[in-house]
Image: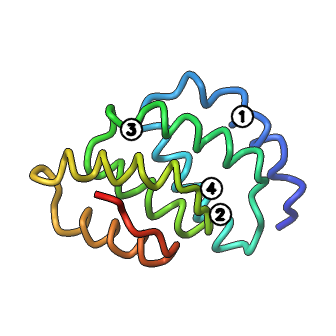
Amino acid sequence: GNQAQLEPLLDDTISLVHNSGPKDLSATCHKLAKIGKLCRWSIRNDVWKVLESEIIRSTERFNPMGISNVAWSLATAKRSSPAVWSELSGAALHNIHESNSQDIANMVWAYASVGHSSPQ
């Protein structure tokens, strides 16, 4: 595939992400990370920055699966913004009793992958 074909989708992502709920935001991060990994494409930094800003604004609305999917996605994409990882750790700890073993395993893997140690 040609990475240039992805550009219109990335532009749409930037313009639509502000109207996304946590489920759509989580799915968008997951799909972009997966595309980047499978196709060995670098997803534009501006796209990730917009997504990270929305993640920070929305962490209290994520369920445990959404939090772990976002963490997996950001780690897979090698995104290491301390502000995002701190927000995710707070949300994960707040929802720890609702998390299943897969959610927890994804979070542990993600934090280890980016080398971020949660302050909490």
Name the residue type under label 1: Ile
Query: Quick one: 9 or 45, which is closer to the camera?
Result: 45
The quarter of the rendered structure image containing the N terminus is bottom right
Q: Tag 2 or tag 1, which sits nearer the N-term? A: 1
Q: Which residue is mark 2?
A: 35
Name the residue type under label 3: Thr
- Tell me where residue 45 appears, x and y as whole percent: 76, 52
Mark 3 packing: few (<14 Cα in 10 Å), some, or many (20+)? some
- Tell me if 101 is positioned left or right of 9 in this view: left
Q: Which residue is mark 3?
A: 59
Mark 4 residue element: helix
The residue at 56%/22% (across/down) is 19
Q: Nearer the viewer, mark 2 or mark 3?
A: 3
Mark 3 residue element: helix
| Mark 1 to mark 3 CA distance (whole Å) | 19 Å
- Tell me if 65 is positioned left or right of 9 in this view: left
Mark 1 packing: few (<14 Cα in 10 Å), some, or many (20+)? some
Q: Which residue is mark 4?
A: 32
Q: Which residue is mark 1?
A: 14
Q: Tag 3 or tag 2, which sits nearer the N-term? A: 2
Name the residue type under label 4: Leu
Q: CB under 8 Å between callouts 3 and 4?
A: no
The residue at 84%/47% (across/down) is 7
